[in-house]
Amino acid sequence: MKTCIALLRGINVGGHHALPMKDLAVMLEELGARQIKTYIQSGNAVFVWSRKDTSRLATDLRAEIKKRRGFDAHVLLLELEGLERVIQQNPFPEAGADSKALHAGFLVAVPVSPELKALESLKSTSERFRLIDSVFYLYAPEGVGRSKLAARAEKLLGVPMTDRNWRTVCMLLKMAQELKRS
């Protein structure tokens, strides 16, 4: 049994691509997930998975969302150990566990040719970033809403990404660890 985390991109944003979390939980359960818990409306779920292949689950969940809700949602799945590694590799620990200024951009793959110089040229004086494997860490103390770096990161990395603030990342870790212990 694996403890997994699903991160969906672009749902329930500005009244578009509505997907209630109870519907997400039903879809996951119908696909074989168990002990499903969701967190906030932006598409986060932790659950237990008994099968070997999680990549098939991501594909199947994406297809179910398209079939039932009529839009294509990017689905990224992590196992508990992967999320623990994301937190351990945090290059900006001074931001604190409760920070909304620190973000983790979860990439669907490791970028082959990321345009790091272009990213560097976009950052404000207070912003810092690091790309570690398939995670783009962004410290934006003035907020990501105004950040040119945040707005262009996915394009310049060349890989689809879904972003979570550090508070959410830490909460998902806590939920997944509790699920594993139960």
Image (tube, helix red, strand yellow):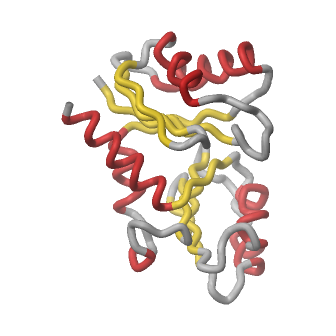
Camera-nearest residue between 20 and 79: 20
In the image, 69: left or right of 174? right
The image quadrant where one finds the C terminus is: top left
Camera-nearest residue between 76 and 37: 37
* Residue at horizontal 73 percent and vertical 13 percent from the top: 67
**Which quadrant would residue 178 be assigned to in this image?**
top left
* Residue at horizontal 61 percent and vertical 43 percent from the top: 42
The image quadrant where one finds the N terminus is: top left
Residue 147 lies, in percent from the top left, at 74, 73
Residue 166 lies, in percent from the top left, at 48, 61
Camera-nearest residue between 71 and 117: 71
* Residue at horizontal 25 percent and vertical 34 percent from the top: 180
In the image, 10: left or right of 2? right
In the image, 29: left or right of 182? right
**Which quadrant would residue 142 be assigned to in this image?**
bottom right
**Which quadrant would residue 86 be assigned to in this image?**
bottom left
Q: Is residue 178 above or below residue 48?
A: below
Residue 157 lies, in percent from the top left, at 71, 58
Q: Is residue 49 above or below residue 106?
A: above
